[in-house]
Image: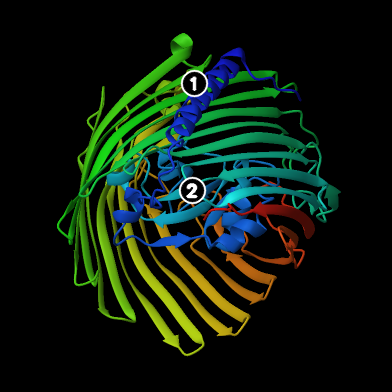
Amino acid sequence: MKTVLGINSIRRIEALWVAMCFVACFTQAQQKDTLQLQEVSITESRYRHFNTGNKTIETDSTKLEVFRQNNLADLLSQNNSLFIKSYGSGNIATTSIRGGGASHTAVLWNGFNINNPMLGQLDLSLLPVSFIDNASIQYGGSGTMWGSGAVGGSIHLNNQQNYNKGLSIETGSSYSSLNNVQQNLSLKFSQQKWISVSRAFYRDAKNNFSFYNTSIENSPLIQQKHGEQIQYGLLQDNYFILNRHQKINVHVWLQNSNRAIPPNMLQASATAEQADRSFKTSGEWQRTGDKIVWLARSAFFSDQIDYGDATSIIYSHSEAISWISEVESKINIGTKQLLNAGLNNTLCEGKTSSYINNRQGQNKTSLFASYKYAHNNDRFTAIASIRQEFVRGFTVPLTYSAGFTARPFNFLSLQGNVNKVYRLPTLNDLYWNPGGNPRLRPEEGYSEDIGCSLLVPLKQTIFKSTVSLFNKNIGNWIMWLPASGGVWSPQNIAKVLSRGLESNSSLAFHIKKFKLILGVSTNYVLSTNEKAKSENDESLGRQLIYVPMYSGAANVTIHFQQFYFNCNQTYTGYRYTSSDNYEYLRPYTLGNMQAAYKFFFKKYTLAASAQINNSWNCAYQVISQQAMPLRNFQIGLSINYHQENKHQ
């Protein structure tokens, strides 16, 4: 499997590098004076300012470091009670939040939605953790902030750095018992007025593992075949302080993936292969005044997929392009009020031989605004937001939201929100030939959350607990159904009601250099079809397929000086594989362990890590007939060199 970058991609990269060099030279010229500027603080995004009332979960820096040799799907599935729909090691992985599909989760990179506009979703197995500085999950609807698709929740991935930290070089490698090897390299220059971060990774994964084939009599133990994968990528981040009030940043992300798609349990062999090539670049200008912060940002994304199967004689090429431009302002009104208003334009285009005329596009323009009020040292905070999107050929509903957080006592916090949400049909939904339906209407509905949080510090112990109730009612739900001539076509046929209860609790003991954390999280999600598709529709009132009603996780974490250990146990309940709920996959429980130790030698840090995945050797399936590995191991080693600036 070989993939070569196209001439257009190379030209884009060359042009971007020239632009960055020009900006760098301009910034260096600005640094010739000896004026010592005060540190310019990072202005938080509207995700930080205006998510009041939403449940959010941050991934701590230690877990990001331990999983640096893994992909985002591994990180989220092992450290949250989030259900990841994985087709196997090295294969596609998507997420389901609160009973929604993959297209109901917005994945944002530095504030830009990077979901493929043709598919409406993103393969999380393609995102390396080494390219991420922080990751968080926002639960519930957030369409007023992020537009179409932010129905069940959103995943936020960001690249952020601190100025004036000197030179840092890090290299790392890992080896897995699945015969998977990965190498990472990172080079950071952090000065008073500029930062340059270069990252690269290379992954050669054979994905060799054994599994019990339950589709064959006596469930024999067999070896997975045709599952190899090669991935490599480059990420360049640049941050510049132009003066006391202005700064800019530029990001370039280039990545290739070539993988063989393994057979399922019902197939004796497979020949399908897929190549994914992506080019992402974004830039942002920010001006900070005494009362107003101005932001202007733009991004260009190109995602190409080449699929081929010699057995079925299927070969296809597709390219999805997105160009996003946005301007916004944040206005401080006194000390208690904050106003945010902006304009977003997103132009997306899909190119494939399966479209009429081989090309279809969509232009979306949105106006959005948010108001935040904080009273009595943030003991009570309220927000109200509104967004209107304009798309030719669609009547897009006006979306709005309101949320609050109240702290009547230091140990107790109450929060809640109400959101109007929507999702536009994808380009494939509209224009796929045969089967696309250009008469589709946007999905729309409401999402509500209410919850409370406890924080009880007791000498050397801290207890935290959050309980959330949610409800989501979505109409015009798009489903692909068989039509005349055996052709499948999408229809606005379903109405889905999702409701449930979530809890997250932890107990932390801290004694000098020893820290023990015990954590438990639970999910109850009832997501049912409330509208019959036909006269004798047996899916009415039934749980949606591949939405576990019960799931949860428990973990034990130990920090002692430079030693880190974590053991987590996840439970995933029954998942129905037929809409009438007569067919299902059995529940499974997975144990995973991670350990790491750091050695310090003056300017060098040596970090060793080990992981045991599926510790109890559980035979399970996340997706029907898709093989998952039994117990497997991974070890890693990284070396970091750090030299502080002489003048701090």
Q: Is residue 477 left or right of residue 223?
A: left
Q: Which residue is mark 2?
A: 160
Instruction: Give whichever of 144, 118 is nearer the camera.
Output: 144
Q: Which residue is mark 1?
A: 485
Q: Position of residue 354 (x, y in %)?
A: 52, 17
Q: Is residue 429 left or right of residue 244?
A: right
Q: Quick one: quadrant of the N terminus? A: top right
Q: Position of residue 554 (x, y in %)?
A: 58, 73
> Residue shown at 79%/57% (left/top)?
635
Closer to the camera: disc 1 or disc 2?
Answer: 2
N-term mark: 1 or 2: 2
Q: Which mark is residue 208?
A: none
272 versus 375 height, above or below? above
> Residue shown at 37%/62% (left/top)?
55
Q: From this viewpoint, which residue is outermost toward the bottom?
A: 459
Report helix, strand or loop for mark 1: helix
Count neighbours of disc 2 (C-alpha within 10 A) and say few if under 14, some if 14 to 19, many if 20 or more: few
Instruction: Give whichever of 524, 6 is nearer the camera.
Output: 6
Report helix, strand or loop for mark 2: loop
Determine which quarter of the picture holds residue 245.
top left
Q: Position of residue 372 (x, y in %)?
A: 20, 56
